[in-house]
């Protein structure tokens, strides 16, 4: 058992992020009513001034009312489920927001408004906040570290106390699953999740299961990190370097939900057709179909992980 506290782990994470050029704030500094408050109440999960400034900075040709429309569309993604809203948000984040506006000459023009500069990282606003209080559905939660890009809460790090033998990476994972159910507005904009016990660490996304939370093994993206470094340090310094983080958000292979859902539907039809052709018992077809789909997802997930191995540094390394 170690004497390192959760507070020490948080401070180490913030120091690593500061070394990568992230601005750092402690949760109470951003709280409503404080001198440098970033929100008017705890139900606001977006740092609105930062987001509005970014939208205006990236789209100087758009009228004020259209900039406000961009803000509304981005912060109120459509969808009947959390996953659907997260999908809509991701597409707007990466592809931009489609808008129309009238020029001074009276012509109607279309535009794709940007909310992130993926080509010039330092044009964006980078902020890490610890103990960020969120109030939703009459529940108050304080995620350990929240990473904001242009005022949007894109990543959450849940850090457990390394001095508590009952606090593990997977208790952190379960806690994030609870948060996800309790704070759907906050997690509707999430792109990455990190869980750590202060030494070991795993990385995943909101839409994948525990089995796809994996280690991150490289800092520079060219070779494996020193095995003596804590996994948490490798995750923070490797994933959240500005250029790499933007690439991961833009190119994240785990976020193409539409393709995945279409493939699942097509596979289900094909599997049932094959089972009927070969006389498989009708009362067992549904279970067999589900088994094949699950096996196919395991294989596709392995291929997806392999395709990002250059970033992760997982070549020829067992997870």
Image (tube, grey):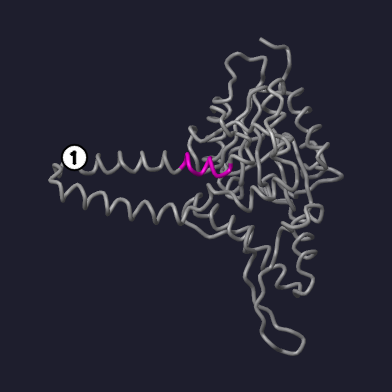
Magenta range: 301-308
Identify the image quadrant of residue 10: top right
Quadrant for the N terminus in the image: top right
Residue 243: x percent and y percent? 74, 48
Q: Nearer the viewer, residue 38 or 195?
A: 195
Is 213 above or below relative to 49? above
Residue 260: x percent and y percent? 43, 52
Residue at (53, 30) in percent of width and height:
174
Residue 107: x percent and y percent? 69, 88
Quadrant for the C terminus in the image: top right
Residue furthest toward the bottom? 105
Q: Which residue is mark 1?
A: 284
Residue furthest toward the top? 1
Is 211 above or below relative to 81? above
Is 60 above or below relative to 83? below
Q: Is residue 193 magenta?
A: no
């Amino acid at each position: 058992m170690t004497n390192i506290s959760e507070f020490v782990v948080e401070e180490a994470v913030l120091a690593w992020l500061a070394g990568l050029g992230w601005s750092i704030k402690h949760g109470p500094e951003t709280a409503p009513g404080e001198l440098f408050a970033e929100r008017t109440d705890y139900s606001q999960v977006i740092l609105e001034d930062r987001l509005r400034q970014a939208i205006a900075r990236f789209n100087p040709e758009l009228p004020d009312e259209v900039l406000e429309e961009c803000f509304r569309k981005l912060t109120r993604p459509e969808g009947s489920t959390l996953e659907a809203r997260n999908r809509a948000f991701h597409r707007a984040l990466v592809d931009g927001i489609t808008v129309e506006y009238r020029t001074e000459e009276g012509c109607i023009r279309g535009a794709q408004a940007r909310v992130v500069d993926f080509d010039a990282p330092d044009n964006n606003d980078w902020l890490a906040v610890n103990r960020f209080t969120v109030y939703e559905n009459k529940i108050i939660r304080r995620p350990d570290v929240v990473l904001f890009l242009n005022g949007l809460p894109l990543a959450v790090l849940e850090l457990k106390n390394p001095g508590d033998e009952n606090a593990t990476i997977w208790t952190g994972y379960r806690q994030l699953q609870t948060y996800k159910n309790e704070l759907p507005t906050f997690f509707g904009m999430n792109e990455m999740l990190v869980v750590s016990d202060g030494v070991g660490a795993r990385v995943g996304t909101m839409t994948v299961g525990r089995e796809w939370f994996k280690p991150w093994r490289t800092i520079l993206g060219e070779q494996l990190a020193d095995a003596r470094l804590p996994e948490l340090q490798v995750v923070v310094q490797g994933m959240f370097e500005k250029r790499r983080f933007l690439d991961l958000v833009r190119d994240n292979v785990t976020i193409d939900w539409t393709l995945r859902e279409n493939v699942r539907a097509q596979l289900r039809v094909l599997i049932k057709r094959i089972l009927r052709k070969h006389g498989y018992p009708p009362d067992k077809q549904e279970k067999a179909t589900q088994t094949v789909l699950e096996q196919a997802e395991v294989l596709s997930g392995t291929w997806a992980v392999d395709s990002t191995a250059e970033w992760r540094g997982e070549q020829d390394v067992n997870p």
